[in-house]
Image (cartoon, helix red, strand yellow):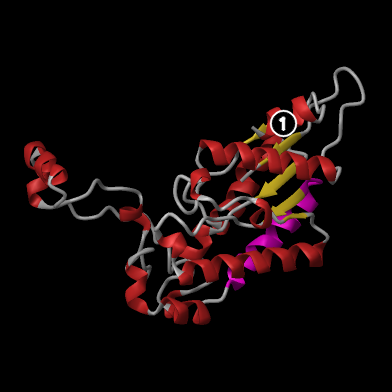
Amino acid sequence: VMERELRDKYGYENVEVINAGVGGYNSWETLINLEFRVLDIDPDLVIEYEGTNDVHARFVDPASYKSDDSGRRKQWDPPPVPILEHSALFRVILRKTGITKQVGIGNFVTPDTAYGPYSVKKHNPMELLDKNPPIFFERNLRNMIALTKANGVDMVFVTWAWSPYLDDYASTPHYQRAFREMNEVLVKVAAENGVPLFDFEAVMPDDKKYWGDGRHENELGAEIKGELFAKFLHENGLIRKSSGPGEEAPQAEQP
């Protein structure tokens, strides 16, 4: 959507938008992704937009809240397989009846020190936010800036938008507080480092008709998101137009 808007509405005929983000990544993993994967594409501009997964990283046992994210991530460790699940028949029955769930990546990399978005309610989430401030999120953002500057790449920060109207964990007071705190960090780091900031949270409608859940836009919301991103980039002169035939297309990466 953003590429279409930039091309058709604003006349950037040579622009290419690449979605370089990975579902489930937080800023630790995005930083690694930026250094070892995204820079190889030789982008002109990187758009940094994330929030929820770094909130998850704060809902851990405070003793485990460390700079390496080990409170939230652990070394790959296959979970034990219940004896009945060695039978394909019993495995299907257990899944269909809801007694067991399909194994996902979280079963391999999430330690016991991490609390889920719903189970965290049992662990005084507001107190966890007090004890686990977004200091590592801030550090990761600063490192992304340093990395892009060292490689001659421009960067844009975008505040996190959400909807509180879909009755999932994005509607809870502790997650909404954390979202706002993360956005405050984005604003602060952007201002201190001269990085353009798009306050997407301020302009994205939170009406539930635009959202698949409280954190992810649906197809209708994605249209609005793409239009708003393109408008911001254009109005702030963040993408150059080609000066002639054969000029390489500017690339806007969106982790």
Q: Is residue 77 visible?
A: yes
**Residue 41 rendering spot, x and y as whole percentages:** 68, 35
Residue at 44% across / 70% down in the picture?
A: 59
Residue range of the region highlighted in magenta in the rendering = 134-154
Taking depth in this image into account, of 252 and 66 the one nearest to the observer is 252
Find disc 1 in the rendering and name its residue. 5
| Crowd tier of the residue under label 1, counting other residues whose Cα lies within 10 Å: few below 14, some 14–19, many 20 or above | some
Locate residue 164 relative to residue 146 in the image: left or right: left
* Residue 205 vertical position relative to residue 143 in the rendered view, above or below: above
* Residue 33 vertical position relative to residue 70 in the rendered view, above or below: above
Taking depth in this image into account, of 239 and 41 the one nearest to the observer is 239
Locate residue 195 relative to residue 79 in the image: left or right: right
Residue 177: image quadrant is: bottom right
Taking depth in this image into account, of 189 and 4 the one nearest to the observer is 4
Residue at 68% across / 63% down in the picture?
A: 186
Locate residue 13 relative to residue 157 in the image: left or right: right
Residue 120: image quadrant is: bottom left
Residue at 46% across / 57% down in the picture?
A: 165
SS class of the residue under badge 1? helix
Query: Main SS of the magenta segment?
Result: helix
- Residue 45 is one of the magenta-drawn residues: no
* Residue 145 vertical position relative to residue 175 in the rendered view, above or below: above
**Which residue is the extreme one toward the top?**
245
Q: Amino acid at mark 1?
A: Glu
**Residue 58 rendering spot, x and y as whole percentages:** 48, 70
